[in-house]
Amino acid sequence: MTDNTKKLTCISPVDGSVYAERPLASVSEAQAVIEKVRAAQKLWAAVPLQDRIALVGKGVARLGEMNDEIVPEIAKMMGRPVRYGGEFGGVAERTAYMSEIAEEALKPIMIEESAAFGRRIQREPHGIVFIIAPWNYPYLTAINTISPALIAGNAVVIKHSTQTLVAGERMVEAFVSAGLPKDLFVNLYLDHGTTEQLIQARCFDFINFTGSVGGGQAIERAAAGTFCGIGLELGGKDPGYVMEDADVDAAVATLMDAAMYNSGQCCCGIERIYVNEGLYDEFVEKAVNTVKQYKLGNPLEQETTLGPMANVRFASEVRAQISEALADGATAMIDPALFPADDGGAYLAPQILTNVNHNMRVMRDESFGPVLGIMKVKNDEEAIALMNDCAFGLTVSLWTADPDRAAAIGAQLETGTVFMNRADYLDPALCWTGCKDTGRGGSLSVIGFQNLTRPKSYHFKKVT
């Protein structure tokens, strides 16, 4: 039975209070739930594709109807200002696109249909898809897998981050109230040890994890020998490169937003920028002026543009990176006194650092906070070397008027996505993927459906 003495506790970064607590499920209790999920999946896979698409659409629409309640919940749980309206726009966009392409993406590959033979390859759902979701975009990151997994005929078990404890509840509530079959989509409260035991016991048929490199390594170790498919998105240190022909104003506006939005807590947020020496001074001046306009404060107030980081522990890591860089010769371009709400805890003033180099952690390690290092470069060759000098590979943002040049540079970059003149956006028609310590696999697009299903071949010799 559930041990009510062992709980997951969400501490709100807004005021340090306990926002929510939930009792942990034991291994046996979780396995009992999963048995019901597996039975429900068998029935769901037999439901016609268009009916599955329609029910998933209704679930997402119901989630949208809950947005007025969800937005302040997000602010209280992880600190994003309510003025930004939550994540439903992206949730709806991604689900709509995956619904639109589902029939084409999942249709059989016909090799032969003759009087003598029938030969084809079909896409088969894995069975139970286990989603371990992160706190930084609790709905957007999860929906990338939830919607296509269900559309493809899978069942879904979600384990959400403790920092966004009620998000999994909300999603399941929305889909079930919209008519999704009972036990097909469930939310479990699990600690790390129980999660690992369930993976080792092969309770799931595919695992999608978004989180830290250490977390991804733990998932892989737990799944070793089970032959369970795994998709991992484990972070980034995404660079921007501003070339001499770039539109400086557009580059500043987009890159600063990509660096500071959500207090810098974005998987594909910009964490380091390389600027052609001819534009460097202008870019830095405009970037600093832009960041000075942010208002750090209570995320429940409409005028706040920068809320607290999700946890004091995360803010402490960013402060440590800044302090180390300053000790090693970096220059702080933002006076923290401009942001009196900085309390030394979760509320952290944004910072731009110059005179930085790749010996500093702030230019190598994931910061995941409102800090940005800017370096001057002479040419493309130097910029490419610096952008690749990183353990991660999620996205790169290139700023130039020349698409051919951007494509030539992009071909040399170790990354999952190459942007030109934009940043920090997930296009559902393109695969969301990465390389190196960012992980493996891919979600969204046709490839997302391929990863959430397996090929199954049919070779029929007909009686004549």
Image (spheres, helix red, strand yellow):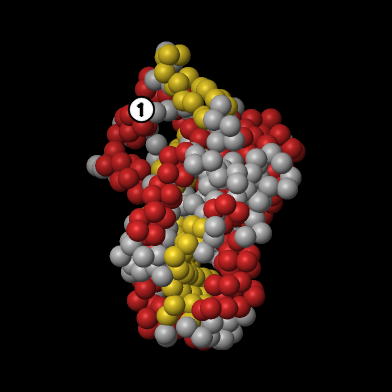
Q: Where is residue 210 in the image (x, y as percent from the top left)?
A: 44, 47
Identify which residue is drawn at 49% across, 77% down. 275
Along the line of sight, which residue is nearer the eye, 182 or 197?
Answer: 197
The three-letter code of the residue at mark 1 reads Thr
Is 304 left, or right, of 131 in this rendering? right
Is 198 left, or right, of 56 in this rendering? left
Mark 1: secondary structure: helix
Q: In this figure, what is the number of numbered marks?
A: 1
Q: Where is residue 197 in the image (x, y as percent from the top left)?
A: 31, 30
Mark 1 closeness class: few <14, some 14–19, many ≥20 residues within 10 Å:
some
Identify which residue is drawn at 55% across, 36% down. 13
Identify which residue is drawn at 58% across, 32% down. 15
Along the line of sight, which residue is nearer the eye, 251 or 449?
Answer: 251
Determine which residue is flagged by label 1: 194
Is 51 left, or right, of 13 in this rendering? right
Quadrant of the snapshot with the C terminus? bottom left
